Amino acid sequence: MTDISQVNTLFQLLSLAKRSISPGAWDYLMGGSETETTLNQNRLALDRLAFRPRVLRNVERIDTSTTLLGIKLKLPIVLAPIGSMQDIIAEGGVVPTRAAARAGIVHMLSSVCAPGLEEVSRAADYPKFFQLYVRGDKDWVDGTIKRALEFGYRAICLTVDRAAYGRRERDIAKGHRPTVRVGHASETFQAAFSWDDVDRIRSYVKVPLILKGITTAEDAKTAVGRGVDCIYVSNHGGRQLDHSIGSIAALPEIVAAVKGRAEIIVDGGILRGTDVLKALALGATAVGIGRLQGIALGAGGEAAVVRMLEIMENEITGSMALLGVTKLAELNASYLTSAEPIPRTWLDSAFPLMREGYGRPAGEICELSLALPGEAATRPGNTGSS
């Protein structure tokens, strides 16, 4: 087992994760739907934003904390729901919940993540959110939500961009079937889920209600008009509708539509501390981290997730100082401008040193190639032939 304390950069987690996660689970975690255009758009949208820093300000003391739906967070980060997390780490959802408690942030548990909402609730006496996929009729939905409320989840999140299951061709072509897809219920229930269901759920849920999968001003307005407390801007990490715009590109129109009537979370390609600050400058309250969370889980479980968040904190703190701000609330769109992105893939843009053959901690040789997720890995200098 690698000593996670030797990991000092986020990209070092990649090779550790790829060695331990099965090829099928790796593709599930890192891939997107069909042409993976939305997946790449998520990263491209972030790369189209550049900073406009202010200088000669006293930035001796930096505060990275914020409040999300009444909960104080050490960092403006939510560990996003991952459905088949048990395919990445056997213990499933208890691990990120414990890591979030140690790091002072929030974990949002997926309803299709083992070992279930009850056991995850007992794993750490710390605030956590519950995200629901609709796998049954009205009574099933209401019963599941009420169980989550009974077990102390502090917010309920309804995923609304799953009317059909995205065609994730990495899984299809290679015959991989994630755990949550084995013997799963009919998609009919999710397809029939509507605003009327949101109204019904709102009527009895007294904790904050979140809708995840909003990408337009029109839907954001409808949501806040029906009493939704938090808009979660997301395109499912590029895993649902292909050829969508990047989540961060959709954020400004949603912020304008909401007009402060709801808090806002955004995910999609968030892989560095600077990505977090870009999202907050555009009006997000916090960001969701999915893939990077999964990579850390595969790299070393709970300790690696905590280490990942420590590194993110360092990146955020340093970047805030260089931007000339001491509190997250000071960020706004004046700290950003448009930029021409450097042509490269979404993964390369976040972890450029992977092209140099680095990735293993403490100077070890990296075995992770330059290949995109799912392609063969080779040692640096190795042609890959045998």
Image: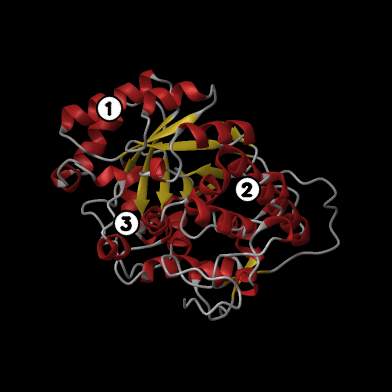
Mark 1 or 3: the one toward you? 1
SS label for mark 3:
helix
Relative depth, front residue between 201 and 366: 366
SS label for mark 1:
helix
Residue indicated by mark 3:
218
- Other residues around mark 2 within 10 Å, as few (<14) / some (14–19) / many (≥20): many
Instruction: Judge whether residue 69 can be spotted in this image.
Output: no
- Give the image's coloring scheme: secondary structure
N-term-proximal mark, 3 vs 2? 3
N-term-proximal mark, 1 vs 3? 1
Relative depth, front residue between 28 and 375: 375
Relative depth, front residue between 333 and 234: 234
Residue indicated by mark 1:
144
SS label for mark 2:
helix
N-term-proximal mark, 1 vs 2? 1
Residue indicated by mark 2:
308
Task: Check contact, mark 3 vs mark 2: CB within 8 A.
Answer: no
